[in-house]
Image: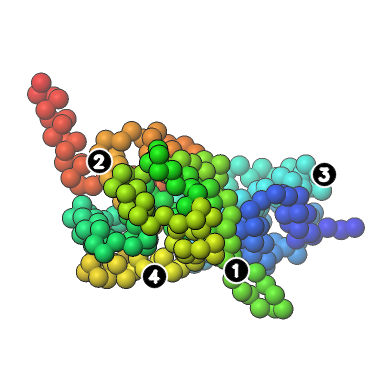
Amino acid sequence: MAYKYKDILKLWLKQKGDIKIQSQLRYEGIISKYINNYLGNLYLNELNKEIIIKTINEYKDSNLSLSVIKTIIYIIKASTKFACEEHYIDYINLNDLKVKNNLKTIYIFSKDEQNILVNYLKTNINIRKICLLLCMYTGLRIGEVCGLKWEDIDFYNNSLEVKRTIARIKNKSNGKTRTTLIASTPKSDTSKRTVPVPKFIMEYLKVLVKDNDYYLLSGSNKLYDPRYFEEFYRGVIKKCNLNYINFHTLRHTFATRAIEAKMDIKTLSEILGHSSIEITLKLYVHPSFELKKQAIENLAEFIAS
């Protein structure tokens, strides 16, 4: 049988076995929409490094996001390695096939803006406001806070356990694409973590505690859609007369404030659920101008001493 590359992609995806359904659907979608359109119909004896690099360069010249291009490269690398190991093709060295990160401007809330948010959230307290405070003071992702159950809250140790995350996934049924809300384990082993919580937030939670199996935000055992929490966040930003910045900004802001408060990187990395401190430094720590000024003053004092 003369195999085409799309046949190998199917075999590769099948042998991956136990991966998260979100990842499975993402890979399937990217293979179907992008890789098969360019490379899928090539017979294996036509597949080589030159044509792969040419294809990747076409992706780079398109309007595809950096995340999608990186995933495409991962799939091509992993599937060709699989094909070589299974003796379908000779080894294709793609180690130098990479895409550079384009540094984007990352926005965070200033201390003044953060205080405006906190003061608003502390008035007429309710569970959604408490959960937004949790994100601001612990760096939880939106899916993680939506996945919190009362059984995850440890009132004795003033902490919480991140055990699950809520997300919407796409699936096709009768030729139509629909989305389904699911609860799954966090994105990585390090994302499953114990996170300390400020005492004042724990005091708020004690007043509203419900059955262990209930989600905090839904007040029942039904899943709570992150889109609803995103809408609530938008409303809070509007009421506080602040410029809208996406929800993930809370995580960026938490990390930056933690560094300003002299939290060590290793501790911050574990609280955020990262696998390494390099990820924390690269993605989430954005020194403010005030922190830079203080660093220069400290240096001047050190030189003069």
User: Tag 4: residue type?
Assistant: Glu
Mark 1 or mark 2: whose residue is earlier in sequence: 1
Viewer-nearest of labels 2 and 3? 2
User: Tag 3: residue type?
Assistant: His
The residue at the point 45 percent across, 57 percent down is: 210
Image coordinates of residue 121 in percent, x first then y, are 27, 60
Q: CA distance from mark 4 to mark 3?
A: 51 Å
Specify whether 137 is left or right of 94: left
Query: Label for residue 260?
Result: 2
Q: Residues within 10 Å of mark 2 (few under 14, many from 20)?
A: some
Q: CA distance from mark 2 to mark 3?
A: 54 Å
Extreme residue in the left direction: 304
The residue at the point 46 percent across, 68 percent down is: 227
Quadrant position of the C terminus in the picture: top left
Q: CA distance from mark 1 to mark 2?
A: 40 Å
Mark 3: secondary structure? loop
Mark 2 or mark 3: whose residue is earlier in sequence: 3
Contact, mark 1 vs mark 2 (Cβ under 8 Å):
no
Mark 4 or mark 2: whose residue is earlier in sequence: 4
Specify whether 188 is left or right of 156: right
Q: Is residue 165 visible?
A: no
26 to 171, vertically: above or below = above
User: Which residue is disc 1 drawn over?
Assistant: 180
User: Which residue is disc 4 drawn over?
Assistant: 231
Q: Nearer the viewer, residue 216 or 179?
A: 216
Specify whether 13 is left or right of 262: right
Query: Label for residue 87?
Result: 3
